[in-house]
Amino acid sequence: MSKYKSPLPHLLNPGHSACAGCGMIIAARLVLEAAGENTIAANATGCSEVTTTQYPMSAFKIPWIHSLFENPASLASGILAALRHKGEEGKTNMLVLGGDGATFDIGVGHISGAWKRGENFLYVCYDNEAYQNTGYQSSGSTPLDANTTTTPPGKRSSGSTELKKDMIKIALAHNLPYVATANVAYPIDLIAKVKKALTIKGPKYLQIYCPCVPGWGIEPNETLQVARMAQQSGFYPNIEYVNGELVQVQKINKSISVEEFLKPQKRFKHLFKNESGKVEIAKIQKIADENIKNFGLDKK
Ligand SMILES: Cc1ncc(C[n+]2csc(CCOP(=O)(O)OP(=O)(O)O)c2C)c(N)n1
Ligand SMILES: [Mg+2]
């Protein structure tokens, strides 16, 4: 057992029911520890809620409130209004925690409204690229060719035929002062981003790449390795914008092909069975290559 002790306070207790190796729970713990005790969290429906707050218990050591699947951004706006009314504006961090389904799809109207109003919260989307809690259905974040229960590969398709929605561009289109991606494989960067975002007034958006063990068909001990490979292949760039300007990108230290990243994941297993799979892998490689070019991820 590791003797390492985090210097940060533990604000998410053990005893939650997340799967072994869950990327979301790693992200949630790091986000809370970076935000600190003086934080209120509003949580959308999804794995982050069902695994942490089985009635009458809660793993959260901070004030936490569950909303509907679609409206935690509105709920957070109401909490901020109450704090304003009490003369306590700006004294407490307001966090929103939601999955990609809650964020990219069903909550996007509420989120857009709150961002337009300039609400002072940090919205954290843990991106596990599908509606995992309800049985691995595809969401607006599901990448091309992924096998989900609503995009099964077969004679007419090789998994999802749709491209992942670019939620970062949607956030940037709202002129947010802070927009970034993070990755559970890079916890120091993730913590720094949360801390930095919370120093900025107004709406902030952080999208964290979080492998899902059962949904992606990986082993519990592969979570961080797969997350790291998403960055190393250019598939999921680690980027940061302040006031709409790209201020930081994580360069690729050890470059790998998307094939290496896709291979351990059962959700992409069908791509390795025949020639048409090779064509699909080439399409995914092209997406990664474009990321590498557009964000300047290449170390050279
Ligand atoms: C309006 C509404 N539609 C559907 C559901 C059922 N539902 C609950 S959680 C969930 C999936 C959540 O997906 P995501 O936000 O990506 O979080 P994850 O489960 O992947 O952590 C769904 C479809 C619901 N609770 N409310
Ligand atoms: Mg999800």
Image (cartoon, rainbow, N blue to C red):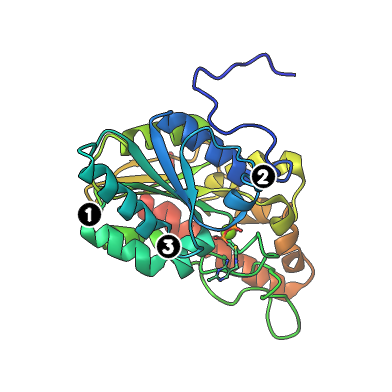
Q: Alpha-carbon neighbours of circle 1 within 10 Å: few (<14), some, or many (≥20)?
A: some
Helix, strand or loop under label 1: loop
Left or right, 7 with respect to 151, comes to: left
Labels 1 and 3: the sequence-earlier one: 3
Q: Which mark is residue 22?
A: 2
Gap in angstroms between the C-alphas marked 2 and 1: 32 Å
- Give the residue type that dot 1 points to: Gly
Q: Nearer the viewer, residue 56 or 244?
A: 56
The residue that mark 3 highlights is 71
Badge 1 residue CB within 8 Å of ligand 1 = no
Labels 2 and 1: the sequence-earlier one: 2
Measuring 23% from the left and 61% from the top, which residue is drawn there?
116
2 or 3: mark nearer the eye: 3
Helix, strand or loop under label 3: loop
Measuring 63% from the left and 71% from the top, which residue is drawn there?
280
- Give the residue type that dot 3 points to: Asn
